[in-house]
Amino acid sequence: MSKHILLIISGSIAAVKSLELIRLLKNKHYNVTCVLTKSGEQFVTPMALAALSGNKVYSDLFSLNDETEMGHIALSRAADLIVVAPASANIMAKMVAGIADDLATTLLLATNKPVVIAPAMNVKMWEHPATKRNVAQLKKDGIMIVEPAVGTLACGEEGQGRLAELNHILAIIEKEAAPYQPLKKLKALVTSGPTHEALDPVRYLTNRSSGKQGHAVAAALAHLGADVLLISGPTSEPDPIGVTVKKVLSAEDMLKTVMNALPVDVAVCAAAVSDWRADHIEPKKIKKEKSVLDMTFTFMQNPDILENVSKSERRPSLVIGFAAETENLTENARDKRKRKGCDWVVANLVAGGAVFGETENQVTLITEQGEETWPKLTKTQVAEKLVEKIVITLKAGGLTA
């Protein structure tokens, strides 16, 4: 049976994009019913919404026929998910205050279903303290907020306020409406990519990590409902949809960001963190004319993020590390798991630069119970298989339904 989406369209110039969102939802075989506010009618017509959705459009709270056929209570309960796109500053403020003075706000107050909102407004409205307070309260109330994008706004100003990309909104809807979400309400932290350790203002030490595997793990966790924070070093990989991403540069930056993010339920440390950094950073670019004999760098060890997480007082219930080895794979991975104090290590061979930047990976999972070598899989499949095991383990510990 197809999922039923109740789409509320409020007063914003971005309301015109709701027509394309309906088309995308219909292509995914969702049943879409639209509710149009009086302000929303200034930008799109009920006829257009009805033609695309294939369903009657609702707008009047006190329509006798509508209240007879499907009252606001029934309408709010019939949907599997309520989506407000675009969500104006006005409707957000009403949601926070519990105001129910039209059909849309009454539905939002009466529903017992998950709610996703995608705000769209002028940048100054989005940045206003009142809006910021409202956003924070809506999040506390359990509302999923798809934050607006940065760019040129309809008014010609630049900044954050554009309706998020429709494919991004669609992915959030698919996640929230998914029938199987064993990790819903759990928090997950994933690190990914390399780190950059500066030598001078333009040069740095790094490694060949692409971030593909870590990003795939973050996406797989989010797909099963987890609230995922991805802390990523410099990478060209696109941000996974439905995941909160924080960008860092150095190992020290990553450690600080990771520790500030605790506590979480599960941590997957997939980043290839540089083991060393220079003991100082040259303040000016080192000129190539400088004699090589005059160049001396002393290196010092970077903090170990996996070990810090594993031994923290706010330790997650499950801590997973990654080990890239060129030899003695299982022996080195076993040793790493014990030294760092983590629960699992996902190990792979990278001799000759294999795996880095590739779409496939072959890994061995090291746990206290033993080793398990998986066949060569795509990195997406590796991530999905790993997350399946995470679900089983967290369920055994009573953390999932």
Image: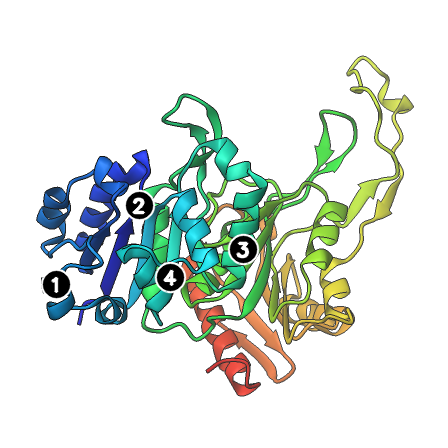
Tell me if label 2 and label 3 are in contact, CB under 8 Å. Answer: no
x, y percentage for residue 53?
A: 14, 52
Q: Amino acid at mark 2?
A: Ser
Please tell me which of labels 4 and 2 falls first in the chain.
Answer: 2
Residue mark closest to the camera, 3 vs 1: 1
Spatial CA span between label 4 and label 1: 27 Å
- 4 or 1: tag closer to the N-terminus: 1
Mark 4 and mark 2: span between their CA atoms? 15 Å
Q: Secondary structure at mark 4?
A: strand
> Which quadrant of the view contains residue 347?
bottom right
Pick the front one: 216 or 171: 171
Q: Which numbered tag is attached to residue 115?
A: 4
**At numbered mark 1, what does the secondary structure look like: helix, strand or loop?**
helix
Residue at (71% x, 71% y) in the render? 315
Residues at discs 4 and 1 in contact (Cβ within 8 Å): no
* Distance CA(mark 2)–CA(mark 3): 37 Å
Q: Residue at x 35, y 49 (%)?
A: 169
For label 3, the residue is 214
Determine the residue positioned at 17% across, 53% down.
27
Helix, strand or loop for disc 2: loop
In this picture, residue 332 sits left or right of residue 280: left
